Image (spheres, rainbow, N blue to C red):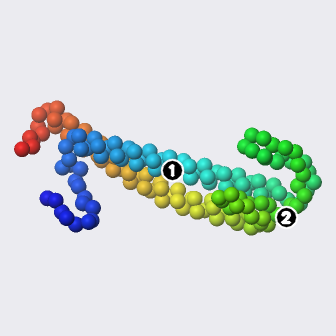
Amino acid sequence: MASSSAAPQQINVTDLDVPQLADVRRQLEEELTHLSNSYAQLRQAQAKFRACMENVSQVKPENSDKTILVPLTNSLYVPGKLKDTEHVIVDVGTGYYVKKTRAQAMKHYEAKVDYIRTNLEALQETIQKKQENMNYLINVLQMKLQQQASGKEPKAG
């Protein structure tokens, strides 16, 4: 029953044969891998923003003129001293940096962490639904394979 409408058709996986089920399984596995990788990247970004919050919390008046290690790259640090303990430079993305007060910087990073948390929750829900679909598909595939092995599958014709 082919339909000419633009809306996607829903297909009952129990109507598919074994090769088609295997194709759907591969597609679901790829989607799950992609979603899981995205989830891990979001968790890393959230951890970086939390580290930024910790760093901002260390910029305080009592640390003024103390020697600190200033990162030039991820693995190269040089000694330096804090002069302005009321302001920090915040990387706001795409190579732009903004001078903010410590409170503004904390608010900025807290908003980023909350935004990522919301996305992580939504992504986790999507991953859970895809995993449930995968489990159902595997059960159907196993059932079809057992039917084939026992010769009970009706022949197409």
Q: Residues within 10 Å of mark 2 (few under 14, many from 20)?
A: some
Residue 86's mark?
2
Q: Residues within 10 Å of mark 1 (few under 14, many from 20)?
A: some
Q: Position of residue 41 (x, y in %)?
A: 56, 49
Q: Which residue type carries mark 2?
A: Glu
Which residue sits furthest front?
95
Residue picked out by circle 1: 38
Which residue sits furthest top?
149
Q: Residue at x 19, y 64 (%)?
A: 4
Where the C terminus falls, by quadrant?
Answer: top left
User: Which image quadrant for residue 60?
Assistant: bottom right
Position of 42 relative to 157 (above/below): below
Q: Residue at x 77, y 57 (%)?
A: 56
Q: Position of residue 29 (x, y in %)?
A: 38, 44
Q: Is residue 76 left or right of residue 18?
A: right
User: Which image quadrant for residue 126?
Assistant: bottom left
Q: CA distance from mark 1 to mark 2?
A: 36 Å
Q: Position of residue 108 (x, y in %)?
A: 69, 65
Judged from the image, the secondary structure of the residue bearing numbered disc 2 is loop
Judged from the image, the secondary structure of the residue bearing numbered disc 1 is helix
Q: Is residue 24 left or right of residue 81?
A: left
CB under 8 Å between discs 1 and 2: no
Q: Residue at x 20, y 47 (%)?
A: 16
Q: Earlier in the sequence, mark 1 or mark 2?
A: 1
Q: Residue at x 62, y 54 (%)?
A: 46
Residue 30 visible in the displayed image: yes
Q: Which residue type carries mark 1?
A: Ser
